[in-house]
Image (spheres, rainbow, N blue to C red):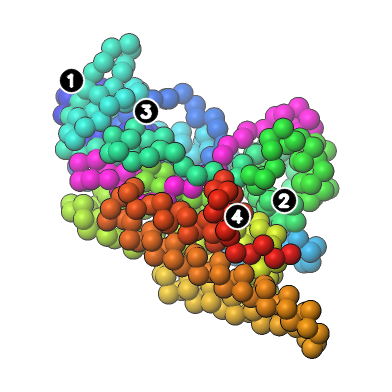
Amino acid sequence: MRDRQHYDVAVVGAGAVGSVCALAHAQQGARVALFEATPERPSRLAGEWLHPPSLRMLRQVGVGFDVPAQAAMTHGFMVFPEDGSEPITLPYPDGTSGIACEHESLVLRVREAALDEPNIDFVPARVHEVHDGRVTFARNGAEASATADRIVGADGRRSVVRRSLGLTTKPLACSRMLGFVLEGVPLPLEGYGSITCGGPGPVFIYRLNKDSIRINVDIPLRFPPRNTADLLLSAYAPLLPEAFRPQFRELVQERRFHSTANTLSPRISYGTPGRVLIGDAAGHYHPMTAAGFTLGFGDALAVAGSRNFRDFTRRRFKEIRAPEMLALAFYEVMVDQRAEAARLRHSVYRMWRRNGGKAAQSMRLLSLEDTSEFSLGFVGATTVAQAVAATIPRSLRPAEWARAGRIVASLAARIGWFVLGVWQLRRARPHGEAKKKRFLDFVARALPASMRSNSAAEGRAAGNTS
């Protein structure tokens, strides 16, 4: 830190989102202090997939990547349904591309750009207290402080800035994620991330660079950690391409993988004008839709470009409504084995196979090129209507009609609870944490697989149909 102790902006957290936030402010002429508690190489399992809008936002602040040495270009997804049918290819719309990059390389590349910016002072220190206008931190065994007109919390799920506002930092567990790196094997379709269904949870496979690929295995909460190795070998390894299996089994047996918890913390508040929350510090969802970086970078650029905090929050809450609803529901549809969820999932597969326009619209929503609630509602309503139509029996047998009625009733109940939950989330936002419980209670009834830790709500959930 230079002799100067007052800054226009203090950003707490020099991960990818915090570094983008610092760059965006500095490039507008602000003097920025960028604090980071762990300046060493950030080796952990975290975000690595950047949709095309994320890549454009990085370029906007002057960050690029050396492909293929540092990263791999991504053109969309390939989905392998659990029934073994032909995979479904879903390219990004309009020929756009994103990248996949090892989390450590991504953070270091964006942080490097921030360190090269003359208006940014990098402060390798742990912030332990935050008040409006002041940041107190520990450095070299001594306590110091700096003042700033705006303090931005980009310090993740356990954010000290979030705690300073009296907001909880205890998210709701959704599942566990195990990450493996394989060397020297080809992808099923180069340039595409593969989503394999059919196991207890989905498997996401993508290239990190010219030599390595990543396998992320999602394990639902109903499977205890003590049985992880047996589960991986018996339930997940057979789903992988044959060329992957020897390395995968070896990594499992030697326990050479990273593990992290997938958690949910809805975006209730962006903080205050003096202490702003962005990225995971503001909220986060299951990473199935890979929306984290796009939402975080969007937060960073929006707060840097805003002079009015109320306008910033109004704009961001409007822009994240559709992505958050999709992130909440998509994992549930892909992982839940109840009959009504399976009907929805297969309805999604049929839509993607038979309707190129709907498939392209789905990809615009998944990649956050389209954040319209109307678009999401239209695709969702179409999917539900097709699922109901597929449930109607082709015979007059009473037992089949009774089962169909149970499935449709369960589906209707879960959609109803989900809509009520989203409505409660909107009501909660003006009041912060105080009104969040009703949202969680309602949504847990709609999403019992991904919000399993709320056992009371799960017991009341609609959808116990087999």
Give the number of the disc on residue 459.
4
Q: Please identify, in this view, whether the residue under mark 2 or under mark 3 is nearer the observer.
A: 2
Q: Is residue 252 above or below residue 237?
A: above
| Highlighted magenta segment, given as a residue range | 250-278
Q: Is residue 91 above or below residue 310?
A: below
Q: Quadrant of residue 23?
A: top left
For image coordinates 79% across by 64% down, the residue present is: 83
Q: Please identify, in this view, whether the residue under mark 3 or under mark 1 is nearer the observer.
A: 3
As drawn, which residue projects farthest toward the top? Answer: 141
Q: Is residue 402 above or below residue 276?
A: below
For image coordinates 29% across by 60% down, the residue present is: 315
**Among numbered discs 1 and 4, the one appearing first in the sequence:** 1
Instruction: Say few, some or many: other residues with alpha carbon within 10 Å of mark 4 (under 14 / 14 to 19 / 20 or more).
Output: few
The three-letter code of the residue at mark 4 reads Gly
Give the number of the disc on residue 200.
2
The three-letter code of the residue at mark 3 reads Glu
User: For mark 1, what is the residue?
Assistant: 3
